[in-house]
Image (spheres, rainbow, N blue to C red):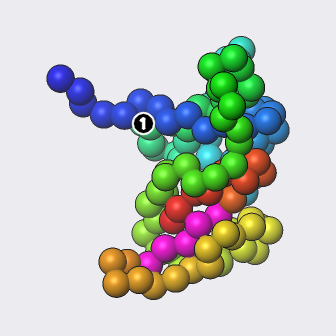
């Protein structure tokens, strides 16, 4: 029936500004086609759809835990590179019984895991 996830929405205030941040700070690819603004790690078939304010949001707003987790070959190195680029972390690199992780924020306060 289903074969993969094609996109995941993330609420943002300014999609084009956010796309530049994802490109500059994370090295993501991006595409802007009218209101559809998407970013993704090079080679990924799943994209993050950067969604600006619309009626469907209701009372939702940008910020909070997206639940999105980015895979990295070396989490410590990825963490250090992002810190060097000025990326703000909500949770510093931490080792838990289930693994090592960190959570950073995009410009709108959306939390993304590595």
Above or below, 73 against 76 in this view is: above
Residue bearing the label numbered 1 = 45
Whole-percent x and y of residue 48? Answer: 55, 38
Front residue of 73/36: it is 36
Please tell me whether residue 114 belongs to the stretch shown in magenta: no
**Residue 12 sits in quarter:** top right
Q: Secondary structure at mark 1?
A: loop
Residue shown at the point (24%, 30%) measured from the top left: 3
Question: Most extreme residue toward the front, as rendered?
Answer: 59
Total labels: the figure holds: 1
Q: Tell me if mark 1 has few (under 14), some (14-19) or many (20+) residues whose alpha carbon lies within 10 angstroms of its own.
A: few
**Residue 112 sits in quarter:** bottom right
Residue shown at the point (59%, 66%) measured from the top left: 103
Above or below, 31 against 86 in this view is: above
Front residue of 83/94: it is 94
- Quarter of the picture containing the N terminus is top left
Whole-percent x and y of residue 52? Answer: 73, 28
**Is residue 106 among what the camera can see?**
no
Which portion, as a residue range, is magenta? 100-104
Above or below, 9 against 22 in this view is: above
Whole-percent x and y of residue 69? Answer: 47, 56
* Magenta span dominant secondary structure: strand
Please tell me whether residue 102 belongs to the stretch shown in magenta: yes
Question: Most extreme residue toward the left, as rendered?
Answer: 1
């Amino acid at each position: 029936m289903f074969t993969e996830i094609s996109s995941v929405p993330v609420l943002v205030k300014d999609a084009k500004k956010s796309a530049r941040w994802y490109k500059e700070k994370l090295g993501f690819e991006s595409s802007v086609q009218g209101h559809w603004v998407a970013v993704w790690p090079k080679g990924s078939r799943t994209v993050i759809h950067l969604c600006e304010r619309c009626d469907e949001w209701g009372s939702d707003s940008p910020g909070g835990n997206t639940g999105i987790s980015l895979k990295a070959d070396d989490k410590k190195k990825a963490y250090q590179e992002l810190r060097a680029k000025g990326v703000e972390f909500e949770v510093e690199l931490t080792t838990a019984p289930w693994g090592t992780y960190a959570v950073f924020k995009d410009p709108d306060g959306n939390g993304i895991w590595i």
